[in-house]
Image (cartoon, rainbow, N blue to C red):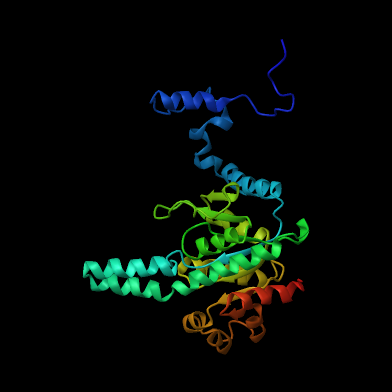
Amino acid sequence: MPSTRNIHDRRLADAWATLQTHSNKGLPLEPDASRLAFADPEFLLRRETRGIRFQLEMLKPDLEQQAHGIENTIVVFGSARFRSEEESVAMVAAAQATGDAAQLRRAQALARNAHYYEKARAFGKLVAQHTAGKNPQDMLYICTGGGPGIMQAANRGAYEGDGISVGLSIALPMEESANPYVTPALSFKFHYFALRKMHFMMRAKALVAFPGGFGTLDELFEVITLVQTRKSQPVPIVLFGSDYWKRLINFDVLIEEGVISPADLALFEYADEPQVAWDIIKTFYRLE
């Protein structure tokens, strides 16, 4: 009788089947010394195995991106709260219907910033269209935090430009699932912020920071610090929305107080249009 086994099958014994059966029977997952260590969630979630979990969060996205030939990314950060112009109009109408003044003001503020969503979308499309037909080593891919808002917009643009894109989402109580425009095989979820940030920078050839809140600021200044201290290779850092960034941060104060050097202001540039942001990156790398 011919064998039904694949000689190239490198799977380990299906220890997960035991756990699945256990779960299907509705049995509680109690500690079990006889359970295989690599298939034992109770063991893997112990404090002492945190280092192993770090390694796994480092390795899984790295191997998958290698498998898809992704070596060069353009990372796009920005607010998760901004919506498309169409959604924003509907949001304002819904707020008006409630008669709640505070809710209306918030909806109007978000609607005022809807143009950033559309510009991030256009930028993502520009990158995807550039990559089409290029040699593998010259391809650039959009990479975002995988969530809604500006992140969704950039992934959406890449999708509309017939490209693939990466999403590095984080498991948070208030976070939604990854946006639908991230390429499914490249949609990763992290527990550790540190590992997620490392993956942002591992393949980043440029950073484009759209207006955002605490998360955007955290990610932006980490990248600026890495480049300033030469822990990372110089990359184009684009602050998209010059009015927003110049109102938010007075970098001249940092120079006046002596905490940064005047030359540090050359670490980033401003842009207000998708093509300008893309041209900054193209000029830096002398792309055709």
Left or right position of 268 against 112: right
Give the quarter of the image for residue 252: bottom right
Which residue reaches farthest bottom?
256
Up the image or down, 166 lies above or below 86; here it is above
* Image position, residue 85 (x, y; %): 43, 70
Residue 31 visible? yes
Which residue reaches farthest left?
99
| Nearest the eye: 48 or 154 | 154
| Nearest the eye: 203 or 49 | 203
Up the image or down, 69 lies above or below 236; here it is above
Which residue reaches farthest top?
1
Residue 221 visible? no
* Image position, residue 116 (x, y; %): 49, 73
| Nearest the eye: 87 or 154 | 87
* Image position, residue 250 (x, y; %): 51, 85
**Quarter of the N terminus within the rendering:** top right
- Which residue appears at 21% of the width and 70% of the height? 99
